[in-house]
Image (spheres, rainbow, N blue to C red):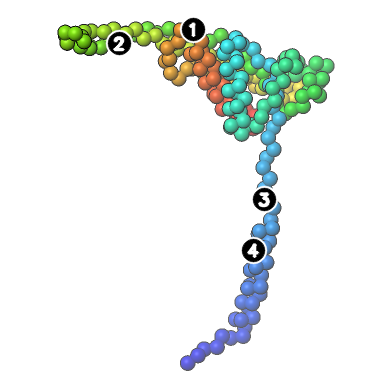
Amino acid sequence: MRFHRPLSVVAAVLPLLMCAPASRVLAAASPTPTAKPKKVIVLVEAKGSAPELDRFVPRFLSSASDRGLGAIVDARLAGAHLADLGVAGDAGTEFRKAWPADVYLGILLAPCAIQRREGRVYDRQSNMGSGAPVRSEQVVVSYEADCSVAVSVVTLPGAAAKIIDVKGRNGTSEVSYADTEAEAQAAEDAAERAVKKLVSAVR
């Protein structure tokens, strides 16, 4: 025996079927949320010893780009001072006109502290002629460095500057005859640490 649906049920279902495609079209046409624009950041000045600073700044700029801050504009050649941008004055006003930005940075890299460590490694080998055991000694020299960096962050004139303090260390105890590679590695490590804190500071 076949059962027929009441006409009232069919009448109630038809409007729902007709609205379903329209709702899907409206959902597909709804605009996607736009991404928040990146803040414009300008590096005003950087001070420190040349070998370490030359390793810090490139790593700092590349790491900032990798972590989503965008390309930081390097305006060090303009010869401005970050202190002028923190107060109202002609020097700061002119620089802001020439280099408009949301955030201005200043870097101070303190002299890196380095420690020389010396160790001895002993080994036993067989004499090539007699085969008798021979004790050998090798001197291993390594360097451990710490580099302290302060990054000053200035936004609007008159606003207090934020100071980001970090300390970088060399990750390996490489043998170095010039006492410079360990410091350079520590400077690059400081750059990575400074960018991590800068991401939070400019949000």
Q: Is residue 153 visible?
A: yes
Q: Looking at the image, is mark 3 or mark 1 nearer the viewer?
A: 1
Q: Where residue 102 sits: x, y (%)?
A: 72, 28
* Label 1 Cα crowd, 10 Å radius (few <14 / some 14-19 / many 20+): few
Residue under pointer 3: 32
Q: Where residue 167 sits: x, y (%)?
A: 52, 17
Disc 4 marks a residue whose amino acid type is Arg
Q: Is residue 12 above or below residue 88?
A: below
Q: Is 45 placed left or right of 94 in the picture?
A: left
Q: Nearer the viewer, residue 56 or 176?
A: 176
Residue under pointer 2: 121
Q: Secondary structure at mark 2?
A: strand
Q: Which mark is residue 4?
A: none
Upstream in sequence: badge 3 or badge 2:
3
The residue lying at 51 percent from left, 17 percent from top is 185
Q: Which mark is residue 24?
A: 4
Upstream in sequence: badge 2 or badge 4:
4
Mark 1 and mark 4: span between their CA atoms?
Answer: 69 Å
Q: Looking at the image, is mark 2 or mark 4 nearer the viewer?
A: 2
Mark 2 and mark 4: span between their CA atoms?
Answer: 73 Å
Upstream in sequence: badge 2 or badge 1:
2
Mark 3 and mark 1: span between their CA atoms?
Answer: 56 Å
Mark 3 and mark 2: span between their CA atoms?
Answer: 64 Å
Residue under pointer 1: 178
The residue lying at 56 percent from left, 85 percent from top is 5
Q: Where residue 117 sits: x, y (%)?
A: 40, 8
Upstream in sequence: badge 3 or badge 1:
3
